[in-house]
Image (cartoon, helix red, strand yellow):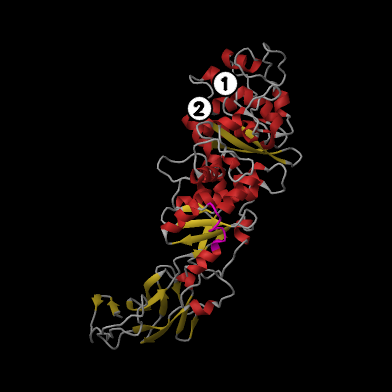
Amino acid sequence: MKRRHLLLGTTGLLTALAGCNTSTENNGDIPNPNNTTETTPSNSADISISISTSSQPDKLPPIWRNHNIADFQAQFQVETSGNVESVNVSNEKVQIGPDSDQWNDNTVTVQPGQMTPGEQEFTATASSGSNQAQDTAPAVKPTPGNYKVDVIPARNEKMREEISQNSIQDNYIEERGGFVTSDVVFDTYSSHEQLGFNKFGIDLVAYEWRHDNDYTSLAEAQPTEVKNFVDSIGTDTGNPEIEAIKSGEQGISKYPNASGRRDGGSFQLDEFRNAETVGEALDWVHPYLFNWQIIRTDKGPVSTEDALYAPTLERAIEQNTNQGLEVHAWDVETLGHGTGLMYGKNADGSEELRFMETVASPVTATADDQQLHPLIEDSGYLDPANDGFQEYWHPLRFGWEKDEDTSPLGFEDKKRSAVSAFGGMSNSLHAENNPVPGASDTVAPTTEYVVDFTEKLRNFNQNDIKFETLYNQSKVLEKMVMDEDTNHIIYGKTENPQYAVVADDSLVEGVWEDRSGEYDDFSQQILAGA
């Protein structure tokens, strides 16, 4: 390793080198900081500076457990001569000056979070007027290949700016909590703030735009099926065909006030607007959507267009009802037949989760229930006696004791399908070449985690878990999937989600294929590979 002095004056770069390189013998991948090449300034009247590494950090631990941060700091000795007016030590991440508490006499301490992983150089710079002198010294930040991830709150200013420019809601960020710093994804595991290498930052509030922007994008791309439908509610459009859909004169889906086989009823705006539950609102707007699709489009309702219908119904309810209903809908693939899931927060603050059907005559329909948007527990997709249960395997059956092998899917494909189902909570629409949860080969949740998440959705209306708890974990999953350069493992349960980075691709493959739960306690895998 070569240490060099650089002397810069007003007339340009002046260098004078003396001495020669000394052969070094490294200990593993850690260079010896004491093997340097000395240099001498060309003019002794000018300023000079030297920096040398006095202490290299220990290898960082894969899991932080009451360690001493001082063991992982680098220290440098800095000497100057001449009339130096300013001095600092820097790398690509930090610049430290004498006014910092990290500078003590001639000793400069650098925190691990201020270093990049692996080998690097720190530059000491002294200045006096237009004269400048520099010197460099090496350091190494040894990091483990496998380690536990500390998920932390981090503002995403780029996404917040996008929201401010595109959201039709002026107070979008404020309505969702401004900036969330406490959540189970943050609180389950914490390491020293100065570690740096194991941090994964996410802006939970801003990341909601990844889902909410689905409607904005579709409204622009397919206005007839999306925006025009939503805007037609509560408006006399002057279009006889649209008004005929509302009156029940056109269409095949029946409104709640229908009577008899030939009477389809009519869309009652006041009933819809004053609905106190999301289910009641859907009773009116869901048939209206199907009738709109069959009359106003060339294709009619199409089961594979669940990603189109979910944000449309969501916006239709939130924009046109009066009781403060909140809706979050997303698409779910059921092996050849698209469906969706729809969360609702009702006027009284209660929460519910429903299936969202994408065809007007579902295979799960019974004489007493159209099954257009049943509560999860009432859906035929989860009733072994229903024809729909036998015809379509639904991802919410993964790991369920009542599941039957009614599909050609193998274990890993079913697991990936389940991950796709809850991964879609945070973003249904993806650019063509973007990775997606479930299909990604760089992010693998353990079987225990997938079974637990799926169970929480399947029994949502009977358990006490909050939707936001699940939604925020979906956001972390989706963001990790977007980072294709890093392998991530998700483990634990939804009450205590854990995250890890692994270097070996085979570990990711092993987690996906794990039937027996070998990888469920993944902390042991991290420590074993340290």
Q: Is residue 35 above or below residue 353?
A: below
**Dot placed on the residue nearer the N-terminal end, 1 or 2:** 2
Please state which amino acid type lies under the numbered disc 1: Trp
Which residues make up the magenta segment? Answer: 515-522
Residue 120 visible in the shown view: yes
Which residue occupies the foreground of this view, 211 or 307?
A: 307
Element class at badge 2: loop
Can residue 206 be spotted in the picture?
no
Q: Position of residue 497 (x, y in %)?
A: 60, 57
Q: Nearer the viewer, mark 1 or mark 2?
A: 1
Q: Is residue 503 above or below residue 19?
A: above
Asked if residue 511 lies left or right of residue 366, the reply is left
Q: Position of residue 349 (x, y in %)?
A: 74, 42
Q: Position of residue 364 (x, y in %)?
A: 62, 27
Q: Nearer the viewer, residue 334 or 143?
A: 334
Q: Which secondary structure type mostly characterizes the magenta part of the structure?
A: loop
Q: Secondary structure at mark 1?
A: helix
Q: Position of residue 443 (x, y in %)?
A: 48, 53
Q: CA distance from mark 1 to mark 2?
A: 13 Å
Say which residue appears at 55% left-offset and 42% top-offset: 421
Residue under circle 1?
A: 292
> Which numbered marker is on residue 223?
2
